[in-house]
Amino acid sequence: MAKLKIAFAGLGSRGNAYAEALEHFKDRIEFTAAADIIPEKLAMFSEKYNIAPEMQFDSAEEMLQADRVADIMIIATMDRQHYGHAMPALEKGYHLLLEKPISPELNECIEIADLANKKGLNVVVCHVLRYTPFFRKMKEIIDSGAIGEIMAIDAIENVLYWHQAHSFVRGNWRNTAETSPMILQKSCHDMDIYLWLAGQHSKAVSSFGSLKYYKPELAPEGATLRCDENCPHFKTCPYNVYDAYVSKAEKGNFDWPVDVVAPDRTMESLVKNLKEGPYGRCVYHCDNDVVDHQVVNILLENGGTIAFTMCAFTSHGSRRAHIMGTKGDMICDMSKKEIVLTRFGSEAEIFDTSKNSTDVFGHGGGDYGIIKDLIDIFDPDVPDSPSLTSIDVSIESHIVALAAEKSRVNGGMLVDIADFRKI
C-alpha cells in the first residue's frame, strides 16, 4: 500500500511518544506536517523527523487552515482544544488518532463521533491500555469463560505521589476549568478498560472524592511559594524539585517528566524553568483544584459492580485489579505484569505477560499496539476489523467518568447513565 501520510497537532510528551511508536512502521508511513504553539518544540520535532519548512505550523489552527496535508492527523493538544481541532480536521477529511479525553464536554464527544460517522472517517481514541499484553491476556482469560460471569471488579489506580505533583498539582492538568476533571483525564482509561473486560455496559454511577491535601493551609510552617533552597523544608520535602527533576538530569536522564519542564533537554533551561515556571512552585501553593483521591462505584447491566479507586498517595504508580466471577477469580498486578487465575476448586495459574511481546514500550506496550491498530485499518492485506478503541466504543468511558464527576460534586448522588446520556 502507499505510505500513509501523518500530521501532528501538538508536540508534547504524547505527540512525541506516538511519533516514536510510528518509527517502527517507517516502511508504511511518512511524517508530512507538524504544529505546536511552542517554537522550540516545533523546531526540535521538525529537525528530528525532517519536516519541510513549509509544513511547519505555529499552531494546529494554522495547519487546519491549510489544504489537507496528510491522511491521518494525530491530535495531542490540550483537553479543551480537542473539539476545536477534531471537528475542522474531520471536515477536511482527516482520519484521527485522538488523545484522550475526547473532550471534557459530553455533547462535544458525541458531535465528534457523529461527524466522523457521517464522513466515513476513522477516529481512534488513545485508550492505549486495551493494546497492552497485560490487559489483552486478562480479556482472553475472561472471554474463555475461565472465571464465569463477572460479578465484581475491585480496582485501583495508584497515581504515585510525585506524578500527582507533576501533572495534577503543578502541571497541565491541575485545574478543571482549564482542562478536565481528574477522573476523566487520568482514569477514563480505567472506566474504559474495566467495562471492556466485564463485557457489560454501565447502568448507574456514584462517586466521592476531594482535593484534601495539596492546599495552602496544609503547607509546612515557613514553606516558601517556590520550591528552592530558600525553603526550610527543601531537603526533606518529598516533593522537592531536586529529587523530581534535577537529580535525574544530572545523571543525563531528560526523559519524562524532566523533558516536560525542559523540552530542549538542557540543564540550563531546566534550572531556568524551575526558577520561573509552574513546575518550580511549592505543591501547597499552586492554583490546582482537581481531586487527589476519588472512588467510583459502577452498577453494570447484569447486576455486577465495579469499585474503582484513584489515589495520589501511593509510593508507586500502577494498576491492580481483583476480578471476581461465578467460576473463579483473577488477581492482576500491572506493575509485575502478572495475572493469578484461580478457578474455584483448582490450583492457581500464574501468567507472566512480560513474556508476551518483544515490542513492549510506552504504557506497557500500549503505545506500540494502538499505532499498529491505526495503521492496520488502512492496510488492504489486514482483515477488516474495527479499531479496539474507535470513538463509538470509547465514548462510554467518558460518559461514566463525567457521570462520576457529577455525582462527586453533588455529594455522591446516584446518577442513572441512561438519563445522563440525554443531557
Image (spheres, rainbow, N blue to C red):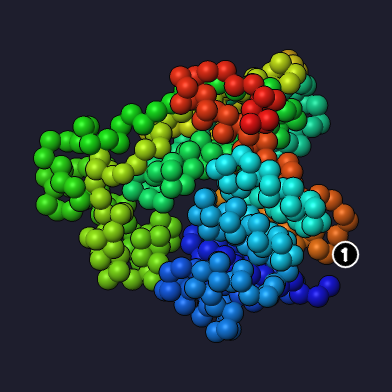
Is label 1 in a helix, a strand or a loop?
A: loop
Q: Using the image as rendered, state which of residue 3 and residue 56 is in the foreground.
A: 56
Residue at horizontal 73 percent and vertical 69 percent from the top: 71
Amino acid residing under circle 1: Pro
**Which quarter of the rendering shows the C terminus?**
top right
**In the image, is 323 to the left or to the right of 237?**
right
**In the image, is 313 to the left or to the right of 196?**
left
Measured as percent of width and height from the top left, residue 45 is found at 51, 74
Measured as percent of width and height from the top left, residue 378 is found at 81, 63
**In the image, is 253 to the left or to the right of 88?**
left
Residue 259 visible at all: yes
Q: Quadrant of residue 247?
A: bottom left
Residue at horizontal 24 percent and vertical 43 percent from the top: 285
Measured as percent of width and height from the top left, residue 218 is found at 22, 32
In this rendering, the count of numbered labels is 1
**In the image, is 421 to the left or to the right of 184?**
right
Would you name the residue on which mark 1 appears?
380
As displayed, is residue 141 above or below residue 344? below
Residue at horizontal 36 percent and vertical 65 percent from the top: 262
Residue at horizontal 57 percent and vertical 42 percent from the top: 105
